[in-house]
Every structure is written in structure tokens, then in C-alpha cells.
Amino acid sequence: MALNTPQITPTKKITVRAIGEELPRGDYQRCPQCDMLFSLPEINSHQSAYCPRCQAKIRDG
């Protein structure tokens, strides 16, 4: 059974002025598995960094 979906035709353009505040620091990391953005502290050579949401390994020290 096919669904009939109406075609949406926008009548006005959408203007995005700001998505959010700028990130205050440059040491943010994005998880390749779940795309969560988080601050990554410095890690030592015997440490590993994991995503706080999905626990994917981000970096080895």
C-alpha cells in the first residue's frame, strides 16, 4: 500500500542567524560512532579516551 504524502512547497525562505553559542575552547572531539561533541582532556601515554555516550574508544595516549 503506497502512502500519499503531500508535496510541501515553502512560501518563505528560512534564515538561520545562529545555531548556538560558539565553543569556548578548541579541544573538542566528535565521536565517530554517535557524533557526540565533548571536551577531550590531555591523556597520558598509558591512558585511553572513550566517548561518554556510547563508550567508543576515541584515542589512545
Image (tube, rainbow, N blue to C red):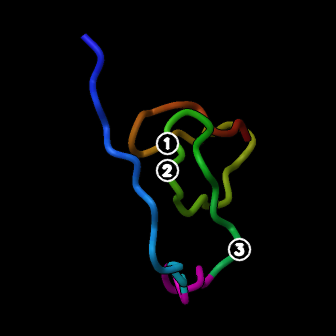
**Viewer-proximal residue, 58 or 47?**
58
Residue farthest toward the top in the current orientation of the protein: 1
**Element under disc 3:** loop
- Using a 10 Å C-alpha cutoff, classify the residue at mark 3 as few (fewer than 14 neighbours), some (14 to 19) or many (20 or more): few
Q: 6 left or right of 21? A: left
Marked residue nearer the N-terminal end (2 or 1): 2
The picture places residue 50, in percent across and down from the top left corner, at 53, 39
Residue 59 is a magenta residue: no
Total numbered labels? 3
27 over 13 or under it: above or below: above
Q: Which residue is mark 3?
A: 26
Q: Quadrant of residue 48?
A: top right
Tell me the residue that label 1 is attached to. Answer: 51
Q: Main secondary structure of the magenta part?
A: loop
Which one is in front in this view, the residue at disc 3 or the one at disc 2?
A: 2
The mark nearer the N terminus, 1 or 3, is: 3
Kind of residue indicated by mark 1: Cys
Q: Residue at x 40, y 47 (%)?
A: 7
Picture quadrant of residue 52: top left
- Label 3, label 2: how far apart the Cα atoms are: 15 Å
Image location of residue 37, percent across then percent down: 53, 57
Q: Is residue 52 left or right of residue 44?
A: left
- Image quadrant in which the C terminus is located: top right
Mark 1 and mark 2 in contact (Cβ < 8 Å)? yes
| The residue stretch that appears in magenta | 17-24
Residue in view at x 45 percent, y 75 percent: 11
Q: Amino acid at mark 3?
A: Gly
Q: Which residue is mark 2?
A: 36
